[in-house]
């Protein structure tokens, strides 16, 4: 069995308890994340993982911002 080293920021992203927390971690993660790391993050959000790092990063960011908006409204309402 082969063991993999997981990026600590990806691990924090996957373990984050809220969308706001994921968004904060993602801003740090996207600076250094490679395409494979971004694909894992996208898959965890049920997003299409096709594309290069920039495309995947954009998909993740748009999704997190939209979900944060609705999470915040849901908690207020």
Image (tube, rainbow, N blue to C red):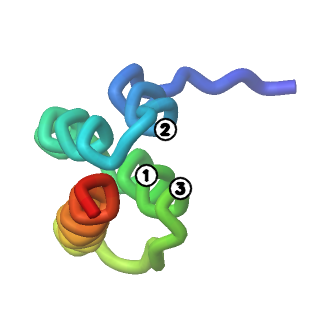
Residue position marked by numbered label 1 in the rendering: 41
Proximity of marks 1 and 2: CB atoms separated by less than 8 Å: yes
Estimate the spatial distance between the alpha carbons at disc 1 and disc 3, rounded to whole Å. 5 Å
Q: Identify the residue at horizontal 47%, vertical 28% (top origin).
A: 11
Residue position marked by numbered label 3 in the rendering: 44
Proximity of marks 1 and 3: CB atoms separated by less than 8 Å: yes
Asked whether the viewer can see residue 53, the reply is no
Asked whether the viewer can see residue 12, the reply is yes
Q: Identify the residue at horizontal 24%, vertical 34% (top origin).
A: 25
Q: Earlier in the sequence, mark 2 or mark 3?
A: 2
Q: Identify the residue at horizontal 15%, vertical 33% (top origin).
A: 28
Q: Which mark is residue 65?
A: none
Horizontal and vertical percent for residue 39?
44, 59
SS assignment at label 1: helix
Horizontal and vertical percent for residue 21?
28, 36
Horizontal and vertical percent for residue 6?
51, 26
Estimate the spatial distance between the alpha carbons at disc 2 and disc 3, rounded to whole Å. 7 Å
Q: Earlier in the sequence, mark 1 or mark 2?
A: 2
Q: What is the quadrant of residue 71 in the picture?
A: bottom left
Estimate the spatial distance between the alpha carbons at disc 1 and disc 2, rounded to whole Å. 7 Å
Residue position marked by numbered label 2 in the rendering: 14
Q: State the residue lying farthest toward the front.
A: 77
Horizontal and vertical percent for residue 17?
44, 34
Q: Is residue 43 above or below residue 26?
A: below
Q: Identify the residue at horizontal 23%, vertical 71% (top origin).
A: 66
Q: State the residue lying farthest toward the right.
A: 1
State the quadrant of the N terminus: top right
Q: What is the quadrant of residue 58 in the picture?
A: bottom left
SS assignment at label 2: helix
Q: What is the quadrant of residue 13 in the picture?
A: top left
State the quadrant of the C terminus: bottom left
Proximity of marks 2 and 3: CB atoms separated by less than 8 Å: yes
């Amino acid at each position: 069995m082969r063991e993999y080293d997981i990026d600590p920021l990806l691990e924090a992203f996957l373990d984050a308890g809220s969308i706001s927390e994921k968004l904060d971690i993602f801003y740090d993660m996207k600076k250094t994340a490679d395409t494979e790391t971004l694909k894992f993050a996208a898959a965890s959000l049920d997003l299409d993982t096709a594309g290069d790092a920039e495309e995947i990063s954009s998909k993740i960011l748009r999704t997190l911002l939209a979900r944060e908006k609705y999470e915040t409204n849901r908690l207020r309402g």
